[in-house]
Image (tube, grey):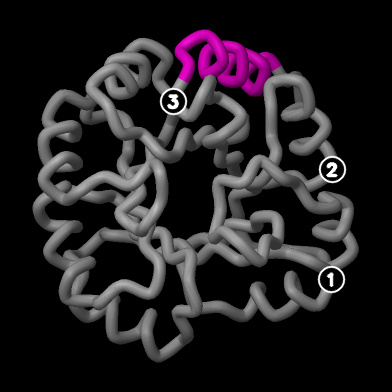
Amino acid sequence: MPLIKICGMSRHKDIEAANILFPDYIGFVFAQSRRQVSPEQAEILVKVLDNRIKTVGVFVNENIQIISQIVDSSKLYAVQLHGDEDEDYIKALRLLLPSGCKVWKAVQIRNVADITVAKKIASDMLLFDAFSQNARGGTGESFDWELIKLTEVSRPFFLAGGITAENAAEAIRLAEPEGIDVSSSVETEGYKDFDKMKKLIRAVRNIKD
Protein backbone atom coordinates (compact mmCIF):
# COMPACT_ATOMS: atom_id res chain seq x y z
CA MET A 1 0.00 0.00 0.00
CA PRO A 2 1.44 3.42 -0.94
CA LEU A 3 2.45 5.66 1.94
CA ILE A 4 0.75 9.01 2.47
CA LYS A 5 2.34 12.30 3.49
CA ILE A 6 0.25 15.40 4.16
CA CYS A 7 2.44 18.46 4.03
CA GLY A 8 1.99 21.99 5.28
CA MET A 9 0.45 21.24 8.66
CA SER A 10 0.35 24.42 10.75
CA ARG A 11 -2.47 24.35 13.31
CA HIS A 12 -3.56 22.30 16.30
CA LYS A 13 -6.65 21.47 14.26
CA ASP A 14 -4.45 19.93 11.55
CA ILE A 15 -2.69 17.73 14.07
CA GLU A 16 -5.98 16.63 15.59
CA ALA A 17 -7.12 15.61 12.11
CA ALA A 18 -3.90 13.68 11.52
CA ASN A 19 -4.34 11.82 14.81
CA ILE A 20 -7.77 10.68 13.62
CA LEU A 21 -6.99 9.97 9.96
CA PHE A 22 -3.50 8.62 10.52
CA PRO A 23 -1.40 9.45 7.45
CA ASP A 24 2.04 7.85 7.49
CA TYR A 25 3.82 11.22 7.50
CA ILE A 26 3.03 14.87 8.05
CA GLY A 27 5.16 17.78 6.89
CA PHE A 28 6.09 21.05 8.56
CA VAL A 29 7.22 23.79 6.18
CA PHE A 30 10.05 25.85 7.67
CA ALA A 31 10.82 27.66 4.40
CA GLN A 32 9.12 30.89 3.39
CA SER A 33 5.56 29.96 2.44
CA ARG A 34 1.99 30.72 3.41
CA ARG A 35 2.17 27.39 5.23
CA GLN A 36 5.38 28.25 7.07
CA VAL A 37 5.69 27.40 10.76
CA SER A 38 8.34 28.55 13.17
CA PRO A 39 10.53 26.07 15.03
CA GLU A 40 8.66 27.02 18.19
CA GLN A 41 5.28 26.27 16.57
CA ALA A 42 6.49 22.92 15.26
CA GLU A 43 7.85 21.96 18.67
CA ILE A 44 4.45 22.61 20.23
CA LEU A 45 2.52 20.78 17.50
CA VAL A 46 4.70 17.68 17.50
CA LYS A 47 4.02 17.20 21.22
CA VAL A 48 0.34 16.54 20.50
CA LEU A 49 0.95 14.41 17.40
CA ASP A 50 0.51 10.65 17.68
CA ASN A 51 4.10 9.41 17.86
CA ARG A 52 3.40 6.70 15.30
CA ILE A 53 3.06 9.40 12.62
CA LYS A 54 6.44 10.45 11.25
CA THR A 55 7.36 14.11 10.86
CA VAL A 56 9.20 15.66 7.92
CA GLY A 57 10.64 19.17 7.88
CA VAL A 58 10.69 21.07 4.59
CA PHE A 59 13.59 23.46 3.96
CA VAL A 60 14.84 25.54 1.04
CA ASN A 61 18.56 26.38 0.90
CA GLU A 62 18.67 26.66 4.69
CA ASN A 63 21.81 26.89 6.80
CA ILE A 64 22.65 23.34 7.87
CA GLN A 65 23.26 24.40 11.48
CA ILE A 66 19.71 25.75 11.66
CA ILE A 67 18.31 22.55 10.16
CA SER A 68 20.19 20.51 12.75
CA GLN A 69 18.74 22.60 15.58
CA ILE A 70 15.19 22.25 14.25
CA VAL A 71 15.58 18.50 13.79
CA ASP A 72 16.53 18.23 17.45
CA SER A 73 13.81 20.51 18.80
CA SER A 74 11.01 19.13 16.62
CA LYS A 75 12.14 15.48 16.67
CA LEU A 76 11.97 15.24 12.88
CA TYR A 77 12.14 11.85 11.21
CA ALA A 78 13.36 13.36 7.94
CA VAL A 79 14.61 16.56 6.35
CA GLN A 80 13.08 17.36 2.96
CA LEU A 81 15.22 19.67 0.81
CA HIS A 82 13.37 21.73 -1.77
CA GLY A 83 16.08 24.11 -2.94
CA ASP A 84 19.34 23.97 -4.86
CA GLU A 85 21.09 21.75 -2.32
CA ASP A 86 23.89 19.75 -3.97
CA GLU A 87 25.85 16.64 -3.02
CA ASP A 88 28.34 18.60 -0.88
CA TYR A 89 25.48 20.23 1.01
CA ILE A 90 23.80 16.88 1.67
CA LYS A 91 27.08 15.33 2.81
CA ALA A 92 27.75 18.20 5.24
CA LEU A 93 24.19 18.11 6.53
CA ARG A 94 24.35 14.39 7.28
CA LEU A 95 27.32 15.01 9.60
CA LEU A 96 25.12 17.23 11.78
CA LEU A 97 21.97 15.12 11.81
CA PRO A 98 21.26 12.57 14.53
CA SER A 99 21.57 8.92 13.67
CA GLY A 100 18.47 7.70 11.86
CA CYS A 101 17.33 11.08 10.54
CA LYS A 102 16.67 10.72 6.82
CA VAL A 103 17.42 13.16 4.00
CA TRP A 104 14.80 13.53 1.27
CA LYS A 105 15.46 15.56 -1.86
CA ALA A 106 12.65 17.12 -3.86
CA VAL A 107 13.20 17.56 -7.58
CA GLN A 108 11.02 19.56 -9.94
CA ILE A 109 10.34 17.55 -13.08
CA ARG A 110 10.01 18.95 -16.59
CA ASN A 111 11.30 16.07 -18.65
CA VAL A 112 13.05 12.70 -18.60
CA ALA A 113 16.45 14.37 -18.19
CA ASP A 114 15.41 15.82 -14.83
CA ILE A 115 14.51 12.37 -13.56
CA THR A 116 17.72 10.85 -14.90
CA VAL A 117 19.80 13.43 -13.00
CA ALA A 118 17.70 13.03 -9.86
CA LYS A 119 18.31 9.28 -9.70
CA LYS A 120 21.98 9.97 -8.90
CA ILE A 121 21.31 12.20 -5.88
CA ALA A 122 22.66 10.71 -2.65
CA SER A 123 19.48 11.13 -0.61
CA ASP A 124 17.53 8.51 1.29
CA MET A 125 14.38 9.37 -0.62
CA LEU A 126 13.53 11.33 -3.75
CA LEU A 127 10.37 13.36 -4.15
CA PHE A 128 9.28 14.15 -7.69
CA ASP A 129 7.22 17.33 -7.99
CA ALA A 130 5.92 19.52 -10.80
CA PHE A 131 8.16 22.29 -12.11
CA SER A 132 7.27 25.87 -11.23
CA GLN A 133 9.23 29.07 -11.74
CA ASN A 134 7.41 30.75 -8.87
CA ALA A 135 7.31 28.15 -6.10
CA ARG A 136 9.28 25.25 -4.66
CA GLY A 137 6.20 23.09 -4.15
CA GLY A 138 2.60 23.13 -3.00
CA THR A 139 1.32 24.56 -6.28
CA GLY A 140 -1.30 21.90 -6.96
CA GLU A 141 0.13 21.41 -10.44
CA SER A 142 1.12 17.99 -11.76
CA PHE A 143 3.59 16.74 -14.37
CA ASP A 144 3.43 13.85 -16.81
CA TRP A 145 3.68 10.87 -14.46
CA GLU A 146 4.41 8.51 -17.35
CA LEU A 147 7.88 10.11 -17.63
CA ILE A 148 8.92 8.15 -14.56
CA LYS A 149 8.44 4.79 -16.23
CA LEU A 150 10.48 5.93 -19.20
CA THR A 151 13.54 6.29 -16.97
CA GLU A 152 13.15 3.04 -14.99
CA VAL A 153 13.49 4.55 -11.53
CA SER A 154 14.60 1.63 -9.34
CA ARG A 155 14.98 3.49 -6.04
CA PRO A 156 12.11 4.51 -3.75
CA PHE A 157 10.50 7.90 -4.32
CA PHE A 158 7.47 9.93 -3.35
CA LEU A 159 5.22 11.56 -5.93
CA ALA A 160 3.87 15.08 -5.44
CA GLY A 161 2.06 17.70 -7.45
CA GLY A 162 -1.64 17.87 -8.19
CA ILE A 163 -2.59 14.56 -6.57
CA THR A 164 -6.21 14.45 -5.44
CA ALA A 165 -8.63 11.84 -4.18
CA GLU A 166 -9.96 11.63 -7.72
CA ASN A 167 -6.66 10.96 -9.51
CA ALA A 168 -4.56 9.29 -6.80
CA ALA A 169 -5.23 5.78 -8.06
CA GLU A 170 -4.18 6.76 -11.59
CA ALA A 171 -1.04 8.53 -10.35
CA ILE A 172 -0.02 5.50 -8.32
CA ARG A 173 -0.75 3.11 -11.19
CA LEU A 174 1.35 5.10 -13.66
CA ALA A 175 4.29 6.09 -11.46
CA GLU A 176 4.39 3.28 -8.88
CA PRO A 177 5.77 5.49 -6.08
CA GLU A 178 6.68 4.49 -2.55
CA GLY A 179 4.20 7.12 -1.45
CA ILE A 180 2.39 10.32 -2.33
CA ASP A 181 2.77 13.82 -0.92
CA VAL A 182 -0.22 16.20 -0.89
CA SER A 183 -0.86 19.67 0.39
CA SER A 184 -3.04 22.12 -1.56
CA SER A 185 -5.40 19.39 -2.79
CA VAL A 186 -6.57 18.76 0.78
CA GLU A 187 -7.11 22.43 1.60
CA THR A 188 -10.04 24.81 1.47
CA GLU A 189 -9.27 28.53 1.33
CA GLY A 190 -5.65 27.84 2.22
CA TYR A 191 -6.23 25.63 5.26
CA LYS A 192 -6.26 21.88 5.72
CA ASP A 193 -9.74 20.43 5.29
CA PHE A 194 -10.60 17.35 7.36
CA ASP A 195 -13.09 15.98 4.84
CA LYS A 196 -10.67 16.37 1.92
CA MET A 197 -7.88 14.70 3.87
CA LYS A 198 -10.22 11.86 4.79
CA LYS A 199 -11.35 11.42 1.19
CA LEU A 200 -7.76 11.37 -0.11
CA ILE A 201 -6.54 8.88 2.49
CA ARG A 202 -9.53 6.63 1.93
CA ALA A 203 -9.00 6.71 -1.85
CA VAL A 204 -5.36 5.67 -1.54
CA ARG A 205 -5.95 2.96 1.03
CA ASN A 206 -8.78 1.48 -1.00
CA ILE A 207 -6.53 0.93 -4.00
CA LYS A 208 -6.34 -2.77 -4.83
CA ASP A 209 -3.08 -4.39 -5.92
Q: Is residue 110 left or right of residue 185?
A: right
Where's the N terminus, which quadrant? top right
Q: Which residue is mark 1?
A: 112
Q: Which labelled disc corresponds to residue 174?
A: 2
- Amino acid type, callout 3: Tyr
Say which of 150 and 37 sits in front. Answer: 37
Above or below: residue 130 compared with residue 167: below
Q: Which residues are magenta?
A: 193-206
**Label 1 Cα crowd, 10 Å radius (few <14 / some 14-19 / many 20+):** some
First in sequence: mark 2 vs mark 3: 2
Q: Are marks 2 and 3 in contact (CB under 8 Å)?
A: no
Q: Is residue 18 left or right of residue 75?
A: right
Q: Is residue 42 left or right of residue 133?
A: left
Question: What residue is at 17 percent from the left and 58 percent from the top?
Answer: 70
Question: What residue is at 52 percent from the left and 33 percent from the top?
Answer: 4
- Amino acid type, callout 2: Leu
Measure the C-alpha gap from mark 2 to mark 3.
Answer: 29 Å
Q: Is residue 199 magenta?
A: yes
First in sequence: mark 1 vs mark 3: 1
Question: What residue is at 28 percent from the left and 15 percent from the top?
Answer: 16
Where's the C terminus, which quadrant? top right
Query: Residue 93: which quarter of the image?
Result: bottom left
Q: Which labelled disc corresponds to residue 180?
A: none
Say which of 5 and 38 sits in front. Answer: 38
Measure the C-alpha gap from mark 1 to mark 3.
Answer: 33 Å
Q: Which residue is mark 3?
A: 191
Say which of 98 and 32 sits in front. Answer: 32
